[in-house]
Amino acid sequence: MAIAANTTYVVSYHITNGRYAVDPGYFAASGVTNYPLRALAHNEEGPNGVYVQSSSSAFPIAGNGANYWVDVDVVVAKAAVAIASGLAADNKVYDGTTVATLRTNGAVILSGVIAGDAVELVTNGYVAVFTAADVGADLPVGVSGLGLGGPDAWKYALVQPTNLTANITPATVTPSVTVAGKSYDGSTAATIAGRSLSGIIGSDDVNLGASGSAAFADKNVGVGKTVNITDLGLSGTEASNYVLAAATTSTTADITARALVVGAAGSNKVYDGTTSATVTLSDNRVAGDLVTASYTTAHFNDKNVGRARR
C-alpha cells in the first residue's frame, strides 16, 4: 500500500494459533527511527505494541509497549533528480568512433533535491556516445551511468541527461605528391605521378582523386628541381570527415637535356669543277629558343653533273 508522510499507521498481522516473538516494554520509554519510518513511543499518540487475541480477524487496540517484531517491508519511491546546469559534452575531432566525453563547468546544479539534503553528481563510470561518428554540429550525445553521491543520495534517483550536444570537427590529413621527370620542352608543365594522404582513420574511403596541378619552378634543365602542386582536393565516401592540411604542396623532379636532332638540306649548283656544296640546316629546337647550328664543310661525292647527288 502507498503511505503518506507525517501519518500514523498501525502495522499488525493475525494468526489463529502460535506465539509471537516479543520484547516487552520495547517502546515504553522512546520510539525508534529507521528513516524514513519512525515507530512511536508507547502512548506518544496512543498505545504502541498493540495486540488482540482472537480466533477471528480483529483490529488490535490494546497496547503494552512491547515489540511483537512485525516485519514491515517498505519500498521508498525515490525522488527524481535532474541535472539543471554544470555538465556539458566536449567537442572532438573526428576519430571514426561515437565515443564522447563529458566535462563539468563549475558547480553542477541538481534540480529536485530537497533543501538541506546533501546530494552531489558522481561521474565515475559513465558512458557517453554521439548518435553518429561522422562530422557534424550540435550532435546529440546520449549518456548512461551517471550517479549520485552524498549522505542523502539514497533518497533520490538521477534522471540521465538527454539535452547534451557537441560538435565533431574534421580530422586533418596531409597530402603527398610525386611528379615524373621530363626532358626539356621549354615549359614548366609537370605531370603528377602519384598522390597519397597521411592521417586517414582506419580504412576510411578518402583520397586525393585526380586533383592537383603541378608546375616546375622554371623551365630549365636541372636535377632535383622544385615542383609546386596546387588545387588539391579530397574525394571518397568519407571525404566530408576530413580537411586537407593545405591544398598545396611541393616536391622535386628532374628536367633532362633535350636531344637536339639536326638535319641538312643541300643546295643545287651549276657545275664549277669542285665538290664544294652549300647546305641549309634544320633542327628540333623548342620554338622561341635561341640555338645556333653551324657546319664546317659540305661537299658532293664528286665534281660531276648529276641529279640527287650526295
Image (tube, rainbow, N blue to C red):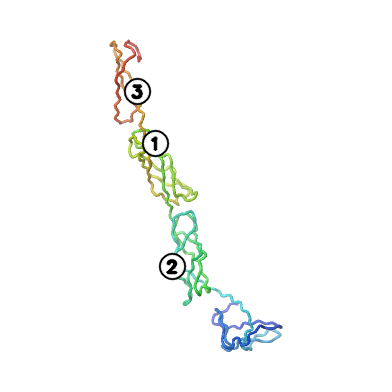
Q: Is residue 88 left or right of residue 274?
A: right
- Residue at 34%, 37% (x, y): give it: 188
What's under tag 3, amino acid-wise?
Gly
Number of numbered labels in the structure image? 3
- Residue at 44%, 64% (x, y): give it: 103
In the orientation shown, which residue stands out farthest toward the left? 272
First in residue order: circle 1 vs circle 3: 1
What's under tag 2, amino acid-wise?
Gly
First in residue order: circle 2 vs circle 3: 2
* Contact? badges 2 and 3 (CB < 8 Å): no
**Residue bearing the label numbered 3:** 263
What's under tag 1, amino acid-wise?
Gly
Position of the C terminus by quadrant:
top left
In the image, which disc is placed on residue 86?
Answer: 2
SS at circle 3:
strand
Q: CA distance from mark 1 to mark 3?
A: 28 Å
Q: CA distance from mark 2 to mark 3?
A: 87 Å
First in residue order: circle 2 vs circle 1: 2
SS at circle 2:
strand
Q: Is residue 2 left or right of residue 226?
A: right
Q: Is residue 299 above or below residue 39?
A: above
SS at circle 1:
loop
Determine crowd level at label 2: few under 14, some 14-19, many 20+ residues with C-alpha closer than 10 A. few
Q: Is residue 165 above or below residue 254?
A: below
**Residue bearing the label numbered 1:** 181
Q: Looking at the rendering, which quadrant does residue 47 occupy?
A: bottom right
Q: Is residue 49 left or right of residue 290?
A: right
Image spot of residue 129 (x, y percent):
50, 60
Which circle, 1 or 3, is nearer the viewer? 1
